[in-house]
Amino acid sequence: MSKIIISAAIRGAHKIVDKCAAKLDEALKKYGPDQEIGFPNTAYFLPIIYSLMGIPVKTLKDAQGIMERCKSLLPPVPSEKFYLPYLGPGLDAGLATLFAEEIFEAIRILEQPDFYVYGEDVIDKSSANIWVGPADDIILRKRGVEFVDGSAPGFAAVVGSAPSVDEACALAHEYQTKNLYVFMAARDIEGKTSFAEQLVEGGMQIGWPTRLVPFSPDISGAVFALGFANRAAMSFGGCKPGAALKNLIYNKDRIFAFVNALSTIPDEWYANAAGCINYGFPTITNQDIPQVLPTGICTYEHVVSNVPMKDIGAKSIEVRGLKVVITEVPIPTAFGPAFEGERVRKDELRSQCGGGKTLAVEWVTSKRMDEVEDGKVELFGPDLDSVKEGGGLPLAVVVEVAGRNFQPDFEPILERQMHHLVNYVQGIMHMGQRDIAWYRFGKAAVEKGFRLEHIGKLLHAKYHQDFGTIFDKVQVKLYTEKEKVDEIAEQARKVYAERDARIEGMTDETTDIFYSCTLCQSFAPTHVCVVSPERTGLCGAYNWMDCKASYEINPTGPNQPVAKGNMTDERYGKFDGVDAFVQKASRQAINTVSFYSLLVDPMTTCGCCECIASVLPMCNGVMTVHRDYTGETPCGMKFTTLAGTAGGGLQTPGFVGHSKYNICQRKYLVGDGGLLRMVWMPKSLKEELRERLIKRGEELGYPNLIDMIADETVGVTEDAIYPFLEEKGHPALTMESIL
């Protein structure tokens, strides 16, 4: 390990710890030792400290002991005359740096609550403050799963500023096209600008939706990136607080990250880089500094320098050992999941289709083999550049698919992919589906040559890449003539109605095969989700038909057929075939599961669930809460706490994860009394499910059931909501005891 680099890192660590210790002393005098500190809306306290030391820092007094530990970790700066082993002391100095900076940032949040803007809003030139600070637990759970399913293979932690705005935008764009997140902190050594500010200056949209995340203007904000990685290890990887070695190894093997230092590197940056090496995260820089090429902690090299800006993206991916699959589609604009969060605002709009301005409809239909010419894309009517700026066109996108293995049940699955795939185009915004689709085309995309035919070309390419095992040919027809669009919409609406009736008509009793989903086992090793027609996947992303299609696409993938076997418990929904599969897939951790109960052997829950249900004994019922609701609940726990209690692949009687859609399915918790047990849910979730809740209530003999269910406007404790339930005559109060 380079003496020059480690010496600089140790010097920087001394500077940082001294600075942070002084800030802590100042805060103690001002606020007292009992003052609470932490990062907003997270159950992980100060996550680097919590994950590696197992100590929850809740107050300034708690931070005192950590700061003393930081000081004890600091080694002396290496002597100029004597050469000693430097790696161990350098790594210790790096950890001391990270611990101290977490305390510093927690105090900053206490003293300056408006310093960061938080949230997931897109940030651009109109934003007054671009720094988002630490991610809350909702963002963690939403974004963390992307590191599991491969849509986000890793992240680049960028510090400093690029030599020019154009080079900054080019590098960010390269990482976006490779689906990487970019976590940004620290202005250059002169304090003039930062990589994030250069991107805004270059007209790019930044923030969580575009995967370009501006954490902080200071190097101390690097702890937010590493804290995100630590929390992912605890939340998804089964790493316990205090299991430092397991946590660091998990990060090395699962969270593929690296550092790009793009301007003159001060000692403090070296100290943070040393902290990153503990995680196996190497540094790749364009600066002229010594290199550390032998392998050791990192997969390959630890520090690689003098890399030209045009090569730094590719070199970083190589050094980290990332396996990035780049999706090539024949369109004139960039394409990838990183662009899904982009917005096309009014002043950027060139033309649009749908969205209430015109009619836009999407329809995938199956044809005979001789009726489809693979790769053929036809446009009937005017194109985007033929209408005035800001104007609109009606649009019908008809995808005709043929294949020996293709089934009509696959049509809606392919159809739903249009939303994601079109949104992956840089400068294009897509909302809705079926006959309520909405396309917004940005000026920049149209100026680059994007036309409606490119929608067909990208669908042809991506359908073949992602779903090629279930069909042989696909052709796309696009219509922009109003009469023809109206005609196609009427045809499509009849098909939509038939599909809904077919799906709604499926039952667990008439289906011999269920499907597993073990996608989340990489972060919840004992979790096995089994999807039936009347119990969708708890993440909300997979129903029975989706899993069936996934198995057809990838027979060795995470969605395997499960012969349900004989029913061993009719009330709670137990099947011997399912139990045998779960025992094997959970590595004998789980012996039996119930499909229809949260009290008796409920299905395991992972960190990706849309909702979590919990028993409310006093009300003789259950409540549920979705991840978008951040307030208190009658069970005494917020969603994030519930996820920490019941998640991670645990089977926790009294709690169960489930999807939003599952709430109104016929078998939802029927073993415990079903939907009639539902006594509380957030108002926003009630409104989202309003039509289905009313319909299901009518089926159960309670047409006003939705009005009997309490929400946060009634109360967030059992004592508060019980009188409301009595007043409304909620059926749960007269049912048999739930316990």
Image (cartoon, rainbow, N blue to C red):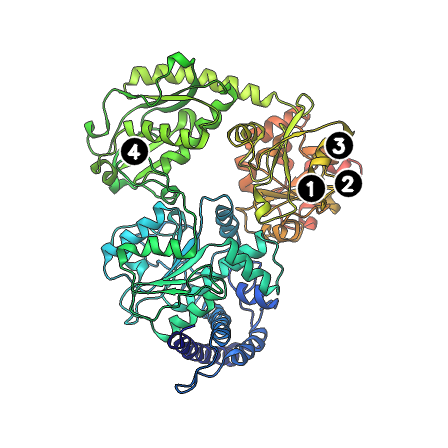
User: What amino acid type is highlighted by mark number 2?
Assistant: Ile
Residue named by callout 3: 576
Alpha carbon distance from label 2 to label 4: 58 Å
Alpha carbon distance from label 2 to label 3: 25 Å
User: What amino acid type is highlighted by mark number 3?
Assistant: Asp
Instruction: Give the mark nearest the N terminus, 1 or 3.
Output: 3
Instruction: Give the mark nearest the N terminus, 2 or 4.
Output: 4
- Asked which secondary structure carries label 4, the reply is loop
Q: Is the C-beta separation of discs 2 and 1 under 8 Å?
A: yes
Instruction: Give the mark nearest the N terminus, 4 or 3.
Output: 4
Alpha carbon distance from label 4 to label 1: 51 Å
Alpha carbon distance from label 2 to label 1: 9 Å
Question: Looking at the image, is 306 positioned above or below residue 152?
Answer: below
- Asked which secondary structure carries label 3, the reply is helix
Depth check, front residue: 294 or 180: 294
User: What amino acid type is highlighted by mark number 4?
Assistant: Pro
Please state, as top left, top right, bottom left or bottom right, where the C terminus lies in the image. top right
Compared across the picture, whether 591 is left or right of 373 comes to right
Q: Is the C-beta separation of discs 2 and 4 under 8 Å?
A: no
Q: Residue 330 carries which label?
A: 4
